Structure formats: structure tokens, C-alpha cells
Image: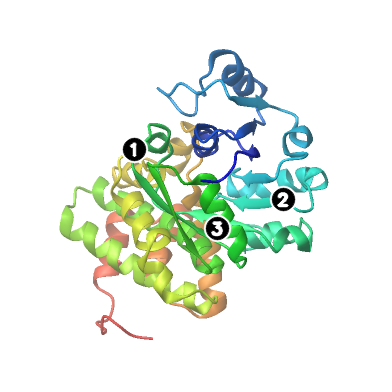
Amino acid sequence: MSEPIRAAVVGSGSWGTALAMLLASKGHEVTLWSYEGEVARSINEEHVNPYLEGITLPRSVVATTDLGGAVAGAPLVVSVSPSQFVGPVMAEAAPFIEADATLVSASKGIELSTLRRMDEVLGGIVSAELMSRLCVLSGPSFAVEVARGEPTAVVVASASTSAREDVQGWFQTDTFRVYTSSDVVGVELGGALKNVVALAAGMAAGLGYGHNTMAAIITRGLAEMARLGVAMGADASTFSGLAGMGDLVLTCTGSLSRNRNVGVRLGKGETLEEILGEMSAVAEGVKTAEAVRTLAGRHGVEMPIVEQVYAILHEGAEPAAALRALMTRDPKPEIWG
């Protein structure tokens, strides 16, 4: 059992709030940074966050809009802003983070403007000393279910054995089990790529297709994820674990999945502009699809599901036609390349 510490969670969306609650449940002193003043006020005065409906937050979770004050002096800093905002937010926070702190990245996505993973984004911002203890937290974990205390298993990856074991001890509870890994690249990519496949799974559901179709998308989507991951230096076995198959199954089949739900609505004929215009939360797969398609081309990796998702999102392709295009591709062995 690890000793309580001071923890700063940077990002007050549903996932950041759930992680703040989890840390507070272990007796850690938790400060939750929010970009939105009204969200911080709601957390401090009413102990609720509109991004995490139906959940009462413990009084020990204190919110602030002062980013420097939130991270200063904290031995544990958790970065959990939407992936496209991690760079600017953490660049502002970096001067205030202690040199010997442990930095945990819990955002899932790829920075569209640079095609960098979140660990690479942070590597361009924080010191080499901080990066030597960087950890990445990922896995099948809907925020509201973690906040409710429902049994959940995740993985934390780091090049530092001591850092990942420290994070394991700080986060693990009797309902939140944390496994460790040394494959930062694989865990990062699993968390990002599954969101694109989930869009495809949602489209299939929106078109009215059943379990056969869903199983095909999940399985072949995983094959695409692993091909790109290995080409980028990941361990293929990571994609069989929590950050790969585990998170993929959750995001493709769970009704709480934002990416799946966007796909469902696209499959039913709504436009992307209509859908995103009604959403307050972020569906990471929409941006990630563009980044992944570019990365696949750069590494010479064939990703037909990603290609079709991109065509639907950005080129006006129809979901039904995209599915037909996938089914009528030239025959090939299941395992190739």
C-alpha cells in the first residue's frame, strides 16, 4: 500500500474527473485543474461535474483554474486534456512541475498537426529528467464506470520500472486493477487507434448490421492497429492486451463510447457537422482518423478500415458504400505482411 501523496490532474473532463476521484479515494491530496471556471465552481461548491452526470464528487477533490498552482509541488501530475490540447496546456504547466515528479499521460490520441503520440508531444515540452519517468495510462475504462467503482483493469507503461510500479501503487484499488508494461509506443497507439475502429463499428450498427459484422470489424481493425504499431516500434503482443483488444472491444461495443455513438449516427445518415455540433465532449477518433491515415502512408502500412472511415469523415463517402468496398477487396490470407 503506497503512502498518500499530492496529485495534480490536468483536465476536468469526464476521464480526468474519474481519475481524480480514484486518487482521492486512496487518500491522496488531489487538485483538479479545469480550463472552465464554471466547471471548477460546480466541483467546489456543488461537488458535481457536468461532464460526469449522476456522480457526486468527494469533497477532497478540489478544482482550480490556476494551472501553475495546481501542478506546483505535486509529486504526481496526470495529463488528461483532449489530445489536440495536450501540447499547449502542458507547455503552460511545464515550468511549474517539479523536476523529480512523475508525469502520467492519460490522454488517448495523436496530435494532428505533428502526427506525434502524446509521449512525443510531452517529450518536446518537459525536461529529460521528467521524461525519464513518464508513464502512459490506458485500457478499457469508461469514466463513469470508474467513478462508480465498477471493477476495471488498465495498463501503465513506462521505460522506468520504478516509475510504472510507483504509478501502479498510487492508482490501484480493490476496484481499479493496474498492470504494468514497458511498451510505451504500443500502449499509446492502442489507445489512439481503437477510436477510429470504433467509428467504423458504430457505422455498421447504424446501418443495422449485427454481430457478424461487428466481430469482423473488431478483428480486422485489431490487425490494422497491430500492423501500424509494429511498424512504429511497438510490441505486437501489446495489441492482444488491455490497451489493444481490451480497449477496442469496449469502445466498439459499449453504449457509453462517444466514438461508437458518432459512428452510429453517421450510419443512420446524419452529417458529421450535425453530430459534432451537438456534442460537448470530444470524440477523439474524428481527428485521429486523419492522423492515422497519414501515418499509415508514411510507414507503408495498409489500413483499409481506416481508409474508409477517413473517406466517410472527410471525403463525403457513404457508410454503406464504404462497407461494400471493404467486403469486395481482393482476397488475401488472414495473416500476411
Whether residue 111 is visible, yes or no, is no
Which numbered tag is attached to residue 165?
A: 3
Q: Is residue 282 above or below residue 83?
A: above
Specify whether 205 is left or right of 139: left
Whether residue 27 is visible, yes or no, is yes
Where residue 43 sits: x, y (%)?
57, 21
Q: Is residue 333 above or below residue 243?
A: below
Mark before the other along the chain sequence, 3 or 1: 1
Q: Quadrant of residue 126?
A: bottom right
Cβ–Cβ under 8 Å for marks 3 and 2: no
Query: Mark 3 to mark 2: distance in Å?
Result: 14 Å
Mark 1 neighbour density, 10 Å: few (under 14) some (14–19) many (20 or more): few
Where residue 86 sits: x, y (%)?
66, 48
Report the residue marked by disc 1: 150
Residue type at mark 1 is: Glu
Given residues 158 and 331, the one toward you in this image is 158
Where residue 316 sits: x, y (%)?
43, 54
Q: Is residue 88 above or below residue 297?
A: above
Instruction: For marks 3 and 1, give the one nearer the viewer.
Output: 3
Residue type at mark 3 is: Glu
Query: Mark 3 to mark 1: distance in Å?
Result: 23 Å
